[in-house]
Image (cartoon, coloured by chain):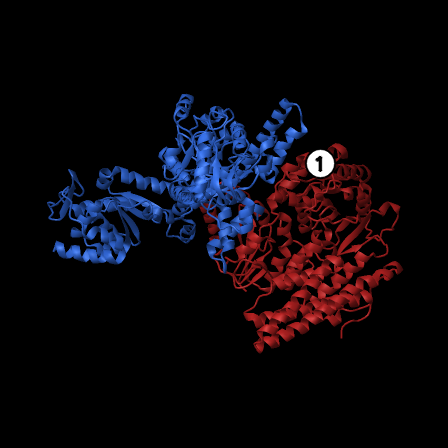
Chain colours: A red, B blue
Amino acid sequence: MKEVLLINLTRMGDILQSTPIMRGLKRRFPGCSITYVVISGFAEICRGIPYIDRLIPFDMDDYYNKLHSIDPVENYRTLEDFIGRINERSYDLLINLTPSKSCALLTALIDAKRICGLTVDGEGYRVLKGPWMRYFTTSVFNRHLNPFNLVDMHARACGVGGDREGLVLKVPSDSEKRAREILEGEGVREGDLLIGLQPGASKEHKRWGTGNFGLLARRLCEEMGARVVVFGSRAEANLGREVKAIGGDGVIDLTGRTDLMELAALLRRCRFLVSNDSGTMHIATAVGTKVVELSLGAAYFRETGPYGEGHMVVESRIPCHPCNFDVDCKGMECRSYIRPDHVFEIVKMVLEGREGPIQDGQEWRSVQVYRSAFDSMGLLDYIPLIERPMEERDILLRAYRRMWASLLEGGNPLEVLDDTFIRTPSIQASMEGLVLPFKRLGDLAEKGMSLTRELKTLFREKRGEEMRAVGEKIAALDEEVTRMRFTHPWVSPVTNFFSYSKESLDGEGLEALIEGTEALYRFLRDQARVMESLLSGTPCLS
Amino acid sequence: MAKGLFEKNLSILKSIDRDLWEEVRGLEVSKDLSLFPSRSGRPTLKVGKALLHSAYDPIREAEGWVSHHLNGWDGFSTPLIFGLGLGYHVVEMAKRLDRSFVVVEPDLRVFRCALEVVDLEPIVQKAGLLVSPSGDDLSILFKDTFHLMPYPPSATLYPEEYRRIERRLALSERYRILVVGPVYGGSLPILGYVSSAFKDLGYEVEVMDCSPFREAFLSIGDIIEEKGNVDKLRSIFTTFLSELVMARVVDFKPDLFFALAQAPVTVDLLERLKGYGIPRAFWFVEDFRLFEYWKDVAPLYDYFFTIQDGEFFEYLKDLGVKNFHYLPLAADPSVHRPLQLSKEEMEEYGSDLSFVGVGYYNRRHLLPHLIDFDLKIWGSGWNGLKPLQPFIQREGRWISPEEYVKVFNASRINLNLHSSTVHQGVNPYGDFVNPRTFEIASCGAFQLVDRRSHLPRFFDEEEMVTYESLKDLREKIKYYLKNERERKEMARKARERVVRDHTYRRRMEEAMAFMVDRGFCGVDSLPGRYLVRDLVKKAGPETELGRYLLRFLPRRSIEMEDIVRDIREGAGSLTRPETIFLIMKEMMERGV
């Protein structure tokens, strides 16, 4: 493996979240060269990523404007040039981390021997290569039941990961120097307790609100003697002003006053960053600063929370969280569920060297607090710190975590089973209802396996008419699998994975497709049986 | 030698165009034409006093002409050479051009002469020949994208023919036309006929049908009593509809905005169209004496079509309207056609005498005098006339064109009386001819129509029977009910005439020709829409992208949506250009 191409036309946070993949690739394929395709606005941050050998920026904002203002020939040529720049080398591996149709199509024009991630077939239909990538893509449809961090999903899809080292960003010394100057200018001395706040986020629904940040800042300053630094872009300057207005004179408003590398250097100086789900949060983790993340709105810490050991997350424990990306919530009740007092207590707890647990009580009812840690497979997990009985969703998440982590890695389903689940009596009673649909799914999958075997025989014996009849039975069976997604939503991770995998089936000739289909039913069977076993405590596989 | 060449050419001609061969083989060389040797020894030709080729060296002259035209050629449109002459420049073109082209020679006599001088073989291997072409021959121009290359002596000698080719080329551009109709009223069906006609002519047509708003528009008058308020609200409603039309314009990006009488078009809309550079045409299919709103709208349009001329034209001139043109009504033979009706249909729709139309003042006065005939009256506005009640069909409801075509077909005599709000029967000064006249005729049905001063422009006496008064009408009804053969013969001739001369297709062809003559050439660019030939030229016709874009010819203009639609319609594996265009479209809609 010599030449690797990563296409990541996403946002800053996603770029930093791809650093473990690159590190993994460099270790797995010593001497390999990584070409990285990025939106030009984020090229600056790539200077601090030590694994990138060649950077190809694409000015998407400018191109988007041109697509709407100038003729298609010129725009075609721009894209052609861009593709030409990428194809100056040929690649042994192309990794597409951009979950869009346009980038999937783009992969079809790249000179690469192997593609990992979202791509297209010859006719332009979407194809998901590899079980982890399929899992990642389908997880967005059942986000609340996804137990994995994006970084782990991507890394596993690329065949790397598990090194527990977190994200990486090297801060250049000139930026460090500038950061020192800025802080000195604000009267901050070495040894001062410096706490960062990031009140902005890409979307309004990810924001905790400047009122909350301001009240927190005031307490941090007044009760802990901290200096609080507010970060943000120039466009977020109003947020900085609002936080300072409430937080008082101890607050240093640096919104719009730093470039990305200066921001990184300043974050390194902070003891903590209290942040919404944002690019700044990922920079903080990448430079080794601990984060307290506020998980609300459509932001979901399990997917994109702070990556690495020892970060804290406060989750708004409202039933609708995380909401879907397309929800335009007018109420944002989840904001008020997380109170400045909660965050203050968490910061205080960590500063005092306590790691939890937190005693549950009336004041904590609206939230749960997590601490990030890697599990035995090197996959990031978030351990709840407030001790309370598990709810149905917690049980399902745990079961799914165990099932996927093993099966997506090609593990033997029989090895997954154990009986270490914690169940409360109230959960026990509803378990049966949770288990039965998985049993039904397992039965359907077995039926599917037997039908595809029959189909293969008929195909070899060229019995077309009978093949059609079996084909219809398979279609009806698939329809039932799909329907279960609606009738029993908690099985949707499994049914969605199955449907997408079926869409992505490829292979030369009908026989290969039949065999591929049989393998999918087998996989579905294993998934359903493992879930059934885990949830019922009884082995259902032989 | 010349004789041998002539025979050889004739035999080539026979194999490729038998009609032309028939025409030319017996033709003597005209006395007006003189062949004589140039200084270089090659023959040259004089037509009258005009020289068609150099008197010194026709070959050198041809080489220069070809170089000049190949320099200006876009590299992908089919060259269309006007003027064959003795063919020197055409042979040279065939030698230097590695693709097919077309040659038009306007004068059969010159062609006859050329057969003695030039070897047709290398020419016909690459060129299609159109000699003294008829209108139908020129329909070929709609099938491709051409680049006109005039041979100057021929263009000078035959200016009208040259102009005709130029105009046909301009007309054969696939313009995009937005046809806008009224909310309701008599001109509503015309919307469909006009649109079909434009489509038949090869244009890309979008119809803005405002009739779905009819109920809402009319209900204002039912809800509100105060007339001033009704008018105000209807005006607001019209403004709303006009905005809807504008939004359609923005979507469709037409080369021509073609509105019919009563279409909801405000002054503001017309101004905005002007701002976009979109030519605006209006067909005022109304009596200018009855509806006077033309005074306000005519000066705002680039092209104004009328169904009356004479004094109306004087008024239009006085208003400063420049491009007005007389464009009479017509029929659509695909709708207005002879039908085989069942026995039940004949019973339902048939009678000795029928009338289809709204109960206007003059009709309400005349028809009661015909109740002694087997009469059926179809249409609305007949309430309150007691003697007519037994004859009114469907309780006086409006009937669709599909139904009244059945009535025309089933009736022995169709009565046609042009509306008037003042006369008690026939309007003695009536001029224009209503659509009904053409429609009944197009059905192959017989009609008696009131005398109109314009009628002889459209039909001869053996094609159409007119009446001048009630007395005259009654006599003719009686006569023609008795003379079936005469009736049928008359109807047959009238139908032939309509199909030949009075279709909406012919009218729209005429309208387009008028506009082209007055400078219409579509719109070169609107936001997001581009001329295909410009795109191919910019991409370079020899490049992968250029070759890909050529597939959109002879369409005139395209936008990204058209390119993507074409990809989706195509089956099989995506090509590289297709993939790139799909990426562009995705990025346009969703960013990365």
Q: Position of residue A318 (x, y in %)?
A: 79, 48
Q: Position of residue B366 (x, y in %)?
A: 51, 30
Q: Residue at x 80, y 49 (%)?
A: A317
The answer to which image quadrant residue A6 occupies is bottom right
Q: Position of residue A13 (x, y in %)?
A: 64, 49
**Which residue matches tag 1?**
A252
The answer to which image quadrant residue B52 occupies is top left
Residue at the top extreme, as displayed:
B318
Compared to residue A281, the image places residue A418 above or below, namely below
Q: Position of residue B297 (x, y in %)?
A: 48, 26
Work out whether residue B3 or residue A476 is closer to the camera in this orientation and state it: B3
Please name the amino acid that badge 1 sits on.
Ile
Does residue A165 appear left or right of residue B142 in this picture?
right
Work out whether residue B389 or residue B243 is closer to the camera in this orientation and state it: B389
Compared to residue A43, the image places residue A131 above or below, namely below
Chain hosting mark 1: A
Q: Is residue A482 visible?
A: yes
Quarter of the image with the C terminus of chain A in it: bottom right
Q: Is residue A408 visible?
A: no
Compared to residue B159, the image places residue B578 above or below, namely below
Compared to residue A130, the image places residue B335 above or below, namely above
Work out whether residue B134 or residue A388 is closer to the camera in this orientation and state it: B134
